[in-house]
Image (cartoon, rainbow, N blue to C red):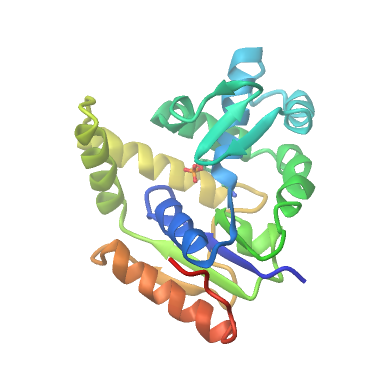
Amino acid sequence: MTPVITIDGPSGSGKGTISQLVAERLGWHLLDSGAIYRVLGLAADRAGITAQQPAELAALARSLELSFQGGRVLLGDEDVSQLIRTETAGNAASKVAALPQVRTALLDWQRAYAKVPGLVADGRDMGTVVFPDAAVKIFLTASAQERALRRYKQLKGKGLDANLARLVAEIQERDDRDQNRSVAPLKAPAAALEIESTSLSIEEVLKRVLERVYKTYPGLAVPAT
Ligand code: DC
């Protein structure tokens, strides 16, 4: 069976960055499942389909022309990597992601990413629903205040306008929706290594994750860097 490492957590917990670093370090594939929901939110918006139309959304999910190329996310031929990273896109993603029909439509597709030599899967339900048999499960958290602050600095760093209080409110609203939906809610999988990263650097988090990985797979061949 292909080895899978799942990294789940709320938005802004740093799981995207950590997942990417772990995948690079091991030379494994990476699944950014949030990007799938983000692209679906965007495609739905363009097609005029709302969260009140679950059957239409599930059909759209099944026919979604999404591909990952290097670090880029494509919808058909269009590079939507930047477009899907806005707060608006994140909220749209969280709304379509709350629909059971949509999640079911995307299950097999996500599982197909588990290919040799291994997969690092980043999301909300990677360890609980999509890859319940994964040998390494990580649950990454940080306070809403800290996550909003990270996002604030990121936006300011790009020269964009940002309001910290609004970001905190948006993050809490999204957490609330992701944690309280009826299917695949955001929660720590059983036996997950939980890392509270509020006062940890990326390097410290990465070190803890890799320690768990090497403990689980002692013979793991790490590609030369
Ligand atoms: O990880 P992210 O912020 O890119 O995810 C965007 C939204 O997609 C998030 O608010 C909830 C949803 N999502 C999900 O429901 N399940 C996943 N496995 C990944 C993301």
Residue 104 point in image, percent of width and height: 77, 44
Q: Is 57 located above or below residue 165 in the figure?
A: above
Q: Is 220 located above or below residue 163 in the figure?
A: below
Q: Is 61 located above or below residue 17 in the figure?
A: above
Side of 178 where 40 appears, left or right: right
Residue 155 quadrant: top left
Side of 78 where 90 appears, left or right: left
Where is the C terminus found, in terms of image quarters? bottom left
Residue 141 point in image, percent of width and height: 39, 61
Residue 39 quadrant: top right
Who's the residue at 58% across and 37% down the image?
69
Q: Is 66 located above or below residue 23 in the figure?
A: above
From the viewer's side, name the closer residue of 176 and 163.
Answer: 163
Q: How many numbered marks appear?
A: 0
Who's the residue at 30% across and 50% down the image?
147
From the viewer's side, name the closer residue of 103 and 6.
Answer: 6
From the viewer's side, name the closer residue of 39 and 92.
Answer: 39
Give the quarter the ligand 1 occupies: top right
Who's the residue at 72% across and 23% down the image?
53
Who's the residue at 42% across and 48% down the image?
11
Single out the residue that lies furthest toward the front. 224
Residue 5 quadrant: bottom right
Residue 28 point in image, percent of width and height: 59, 61
Residue 65 point in image, percent of width and height: 71, 27
Side of 181 where 18 appears, left or right: left
Where is the N terminus found, in terms of image quarters? bottom right
